[in-house]
Amino acid sequence: MENIKLTDQEEKFCLVFACGPSPYNGNARKTFDLVFNGNTGMLFDPSKNGIEEHTKKEVDVAIAVRQLVLRDDIRDRIDQLKSETLVDATTLRPRLTETLLKIADECSTLMVVDRWGNTQSPAALRSVAVNAISKLTDMYGIKEDIAHKVMLEGADGDGITFNLIVPEANKENGIDKVIE
């Protein structure tokens, strides 16, 4: 294959498709619409354009996307970009830790009020906080080293203590053994 230079839009398509944000990453149709048509994927308004015109545009875009993605130079560039993307446990772990700690902090102190102003039970949010801490302990492999109690304290010093009960694996009743 000869080395063909990509246009700026084609390069942008490859970058957004391979490394872009959530609605575009891996979605050729949305990425094409964003890069080549300037559309962000908003809902179609039939009052502005006719439905037939919109349908024709959708078909044209689908064909153009298919032709673009099947080009060898585009596929090679996307593969190159994906291979350069470095997301592994060492780069992802700090981000996950920070996010889980924020979730645990926020959910352990947040009070929820319904639309009529009535305070709701904080149990669901406290459960989310406990699950976030549980995921952190699993992620760092410290589940066995901690006490089986989790204490969530609010800013005013009030708190809730959860006793974690971890069932023991019963070796006698393994999956391969029939219980009579």
Image (cartoon, rainbow, N blue to C red):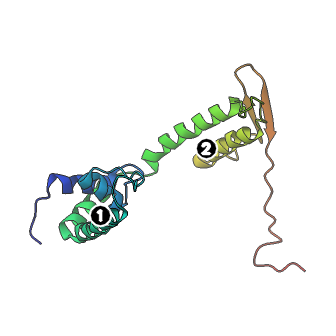
| Residue at the (80%, 58%) spot, across then down | 168
Give the side of residue 113 with respect to residue 172, left or right.
left
| Residue at the (65%, 41%) spot, across then down | 133
Q: For residue 32, what is the image quadrant?
A: bottom left
Residue 127: horizontal and vertical position, in percent?
73, 42
Residue situated in front as seen by the camera: 135 or 175:
135
Residue 161: horizontal and vertical position, in percent?
80, 34
Secondary structure at badge 1 equals helix
Give the side of residue 142 with respect to residue 18, left or right.
right
Q: For residue 66, what is the image quadrant?
A: bottom left
Question: Above or below — where is 157 with respect to 107?
Answer: above
Question: Above or below — where is 99 with respect to 25?
Answer: above
Give the side of residue 11 with respect to residue 140, left or right.
left
Residue that carries the numbered disc 1 in the rendered image:
57
Q: For residue 116, what is the image quadrant?
A: top right
Residue 51: horizontal and vertical position, in percent?
37, 63
Residue that carries the numbered disc 2 in the rendered image:
136
Question: Above or below — where is 167 with respect to 178?
Answer: above
